[in-house]
Image (cartoon, rainbow, N blue to C red):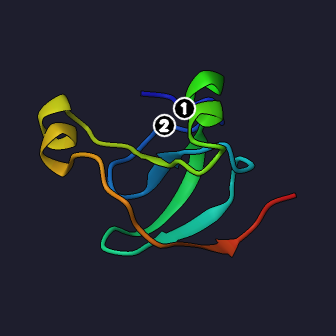
């Protein structure tokens, strides 16, 4: 799958977020990921831009991971 950043998304490497494309984030319990896709505007609005969708290769893996609350730190912010 190709993300909105034009990059092929890879599980364990990429995520979707309202943050600028290319931003690197560290998510507790997940690891370091790069923003290369976007969340829908209505979802970003619903969560006040405080949401990150972790990319998974298959639906079952995403279901097993579930919805979580985690600490997130920007490692590199792209302006």
State whether residue 76 appears in this view: yes
Query: Can you say whether 64 is above or below 73 in the image?
Result: above
Q: Position of residue 15 (x, y in %)?
A: 48, 48
> Label 1 to label 2, Cα distance in Å?
6 Å
Q: Secondary structure at mark 1?
A: loop
Say few, some or many: other residues with alpha carbon within 10 Å of mark 2 (under 14 / 14 to 19 / 20 or more).
Answer: few
Which image quarter: residue 22?
bottom right
Q: Residue at x 57, y 38 (%)?
A: 7
Q: Residue at x 22, y 46 (%)?
A: 66
State whether residue 6 appears in this view: no
Which mark, by number, is residue 3?
1
Q: Nearer the viewer, mark 1 or mark 2?
A: 1
Which image quarter: residue 74?
bottom right
Of all residues, the one furthest to the right in this rendering is 79
Which mark, by number, is residue 48?
none
Q: Quadrant of the N terminus?
A: top left
Q: Earlier in the sequence, mark 1 or mark 2?
A: 1
Q: How many marks?
A: 2
Q: Residue at x 62, y 29 (%)?
A: 4
Q: Decide if residue 23 is on the left or right side of residue 53.
A: right
Q: Position of residue 69 (x, y in %)?
A: 37, 60
Q: Which residue is mark 2?
A: 8
Q: Decide if residue 49 is on the left or right side of residue 32.
A: right
Query: Can you say whether 64 is above or below 27 in the image?
Result: above
Q: Position of residue 19 (x, y in %)?
A: 70, 50
Q: Quadrant of the C terminus?
A: bottom right
Q: Decide if residue 2 is on the left or right side of residue 69.
A: right
Q: Secondary structure at mark 2?
A: loop
For the residues bearing labels 1 and 2, Cβ distance under 8 angstroms: yes
Say few, some or many: other residues with alpha carbon within 10 Å of mark 1 (under 14 / 14 to 19 / 20 or more).
Answer: some
Q: Residue at x 55, y 29 (%)?
A: 43
């Amino acid at each position: 799958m190709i993300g909105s950043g034009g990059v092929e998304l890879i599980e364990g490497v990429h995520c979707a977020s309202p943050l600028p494309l290319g931003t690197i984030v560290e998510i507790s319990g997940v690891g370091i990921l790069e923003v290369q896709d976007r969340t829908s505007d209505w979802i970003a609005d619903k969560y006040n831009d405080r949401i990150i969708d972790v990319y998974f290769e298959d639906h079952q893996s995403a279901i097993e991971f579930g919805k979580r609350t985690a600490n997130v730190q920007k490692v590199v912010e792209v302006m």
